[in-house]
Image (cartoon, grey):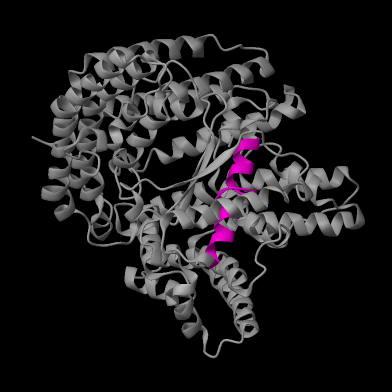
């Protein structure tokens, strides 16, 4: 029996999922039928509402993070029927958005239309590639996502815990659907590289320890508020424990056994994404999607080489200022190994991150006229994910869900967490990096929720990297080692341009990429290896950071030149962030308009490649 046939059989009898799907389809069809016909502003608003509602209700995990009500007991339907239904609905949304006279829209709403159409078109173009057959990597998948979703749910009342339990009851179905997709990928020889899967079994096993209270899946039941009576707490915990032993452990155990017995042994040994079926076109699509440019992998590789050379020269100057007696390799080895640069205690590491964050907060009004209301905190990356997770990441908060933003710092293997990288990392992940930009977007009441929650990697990560350069204005990087750390982080993103395209387009081996990274950076080898494996399973994603940063720096230089004494850094930053995340081509046009409105003149960059997404409904 084929894996595809097994997949259909495995999902055909799921009455609840099928009934929900039918209701969604009926409501979706009715909403399309009800779209205004001869009123473009009203039609656009209705399309935005439908798109946002459809995204939240089709992807309940995202709805939980956003605080969208009504779907907290569900998971995304990843059966083949569910996937194809969503694809067809996306195609129909794209078709409906074509029948709209953009010339009859107010100027302020034309950007809404451009982004809606561009996003739908990009998504539909992606359907030709089998991303659905890669549902799990060591960096992403249900073993990483499910605990976070469960722990983001409300935990204030008995009914909140009933919703968590109802969602847990449906989790084995999600595990079965995920396994079926992995089986189909294995059959079609579409898997992550085998070398990157070494930690996957451990990640899954970490979810199902013998003692239920130690499982990340049941963390909520260790945090029950006193407002819930002791008897009710006991009943809920007993129900959770029984569900854990009878349903959850067998489901996850079956998945980990499949991973060890079949998936890893059968996974692709070749690491180049372009060696997958239709890999060259698939990688080119991922590059365009992530960077929102039409730059080719070869062009990006050359930009990376140029940036590495530039930053390396700056690093050499800093080494000279330290008086260190030795070459670049010796200096980076000194930074990687000298005990003075490392903490011996995890809490001390976290305490210093919090101290840096607090110092930054007091300097922000000099650079920004508008700051977000939503607070943020600093927490360690959960133990079940820390070994194969990168140095840090940011998790957005939500005013609607009553949840602050979180800067997650990795405390695993302290000898790989140097002090000299901490200032640059905090600026990037917290303030004025991801938290400031994302929280401000969430608080833009004049933007449709579809816009407030949109994540364009090149903008969001480009802003994070650009923010690192603001550390000088915030009173950071005062000692040469922290200055070198900031340059190391800039180098890190420049190296990405070289090694991502090198491995996936130009035939580089994994070992060659690790060696290139190590020879141009002071980052510890553990971090470098984790990073390279990230690029192997998320091809093209890491290219967005440096390209986004370069575009923002280019726009700032353009504004400074055009406005001269009238340039104000606070106004520039406020304008840049005022429309939420944008594709780079849209951002440039918007900022050029802002400069012109202030009496400045701009000129297009010479020989600049055409930007992705410059489309009209007729194209």
User: How far from the left and from the top, in percent, is residue 216?
Assistant: 30, 37
Res 560 quadrant in image: bottom right
Residue 591 visible in rendering: yes
User: How far from the left and from the top, in percent, is residue 311?
Assistant: 60, 73
Q: Quadrant of the C terminus?
A: top right
User: How far from the left and from the top, in percent, is residue 272?
Assistant: 33, 61
Residue 614 visible in rendering: no
Q: Is residue 444 left or right of residue 225?
A: right
Q: Quadrant of the N terminus?
A: top left
Whether residue 477 is situated above or below residue 204 in the rendered picture: below
Res 80 quadrant in image: top left
> Which residue is found at the position 24% from the left and 44% from the top?
206
> Which residue is found at the position 53% from the left and 21% from the top?
96
Whether residue 179 is situated above or below residue 382 in the rendered picture: above
Q: Which residues are magenta?
A: 420-440
> Which residue is found at the position 45% from the left and 35% from the top?
124
């Amino acid at each position: 029996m084929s894996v595809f046939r097994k997949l259909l059989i495995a999902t055909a009898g799921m009455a609840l999922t099928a009934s929900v799907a039918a209701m969604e389809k009926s409501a979706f069809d009715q909403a399309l039928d009800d779209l205004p016909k001869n009123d473009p502003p009203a039609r656009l608003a209705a399309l935005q509402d439908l798109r946002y509602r459809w995204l939240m209700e089709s992807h309940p995990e995202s709805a939980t993070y956003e605080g969208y009500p009504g779907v907290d007991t569900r998971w995304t339907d990843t059966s083949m029927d569910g996937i194809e239904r969503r694809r067809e609905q996306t195609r129909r949304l794209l078709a409906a958005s074509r029948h709209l006279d953009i010339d009859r829209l107010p100027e302020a709403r034309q950007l809404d239309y451009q982004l809606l159409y561009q996003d739908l078109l990009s998504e539909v173009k992606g359907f030709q590639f089998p991303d659905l057959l890669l549902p799990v990597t060591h960096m992403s998948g249900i073993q990483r996502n499910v605990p976070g979703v469960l722990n983001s749910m409300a935990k204030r009342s008995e009914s909140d815990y009933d919703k968590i339990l109802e969602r847990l009851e449906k989790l084995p179905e999600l595990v079965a659907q995920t396994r079926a997709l992995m089986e189909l990928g294995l059959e079609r020889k579409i898997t992550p590289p085998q070398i990157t899967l070494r930690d996957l079994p451990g990640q899954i096993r970490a979810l199902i320890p013998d003692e239920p209270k130690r499982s990340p899946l049941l963390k909520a039941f260790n945090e029950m508020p006193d407002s819930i009576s002791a008897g009710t707490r006991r009943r809920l915990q007993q129900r959770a424990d029984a569900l854990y032993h009878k349903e959850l452990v067998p489901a996850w155990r079956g998945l980990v056994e499949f991973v060890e017995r079949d998936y890893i042994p059968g996974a692709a040994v070749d690491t180049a994404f372009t060696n997958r079926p239709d890999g060259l076109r698939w990688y080119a699509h991922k590059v365009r999607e992530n960077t929102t440019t039409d730059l080719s992998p070869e062009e990006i590789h050359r930009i990376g080489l140029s940036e590495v050379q530039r930053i390396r020269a700056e690093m050499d100057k800093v080494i000279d200022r330290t008086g260190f007696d030795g070459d670049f390799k010796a200096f980076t080895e000194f930074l990687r190994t000298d005990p003075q640069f490392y903490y011996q205690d995890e809490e001390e590491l976290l305490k210093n991150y919090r101290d840096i964050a607090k110092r930054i907060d007091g300097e922000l009004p000099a650079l920004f006229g508008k700051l977000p209301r939503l607070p943020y905190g600093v927490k360690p990356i959960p133990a079940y994910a820390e070994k194969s997770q990168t140095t840090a990441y940011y998790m957005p908060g939500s005013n609607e869900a009553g949840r602050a933003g979180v800067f997650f710092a990795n405390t695993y293997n302290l000898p790989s967490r140097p002090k000299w990288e901490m200032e640059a990392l905090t600026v990037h992940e917290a303030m004025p990096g991801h938290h400031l930009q994302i929280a401000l977007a969430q608080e833009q009441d004049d933007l449709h929720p579809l816009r407030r929650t949109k994540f364009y990697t090149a903008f969001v990560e480009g802003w994070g990297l650009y923010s690192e350069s603001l550390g000088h204005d915030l009173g950071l990087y005062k000692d040469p080692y922290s200055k070198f750390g900031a340059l190391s982080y800039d180098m890190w993103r420049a190296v990405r341009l070289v090694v991502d395209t090198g491995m996936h387009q130009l035939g580089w081996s994994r070992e060659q990429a690790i060696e290139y990274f190590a020879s141009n950076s002071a980052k510890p080898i553990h971090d470098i290896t984790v990073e390279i494996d990230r690029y192997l399973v998320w091809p093209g994603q890491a290219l967005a950071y440096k390209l986004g940063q370069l575009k923002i720096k280019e726009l700032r230089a353009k504004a400074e030149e055009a406005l001269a004494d009238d340039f104000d850094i606070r106004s520039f930053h406020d304008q840049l962030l005022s429309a939420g995340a944008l594709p780079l081509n849209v951002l440039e046009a918007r900022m050029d308009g802002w400069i012109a409105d202030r009496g400045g003149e701009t000129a297009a960059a010479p020989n600049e490649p055409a930007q992705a997404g410059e489309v009209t409904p007729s194209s």
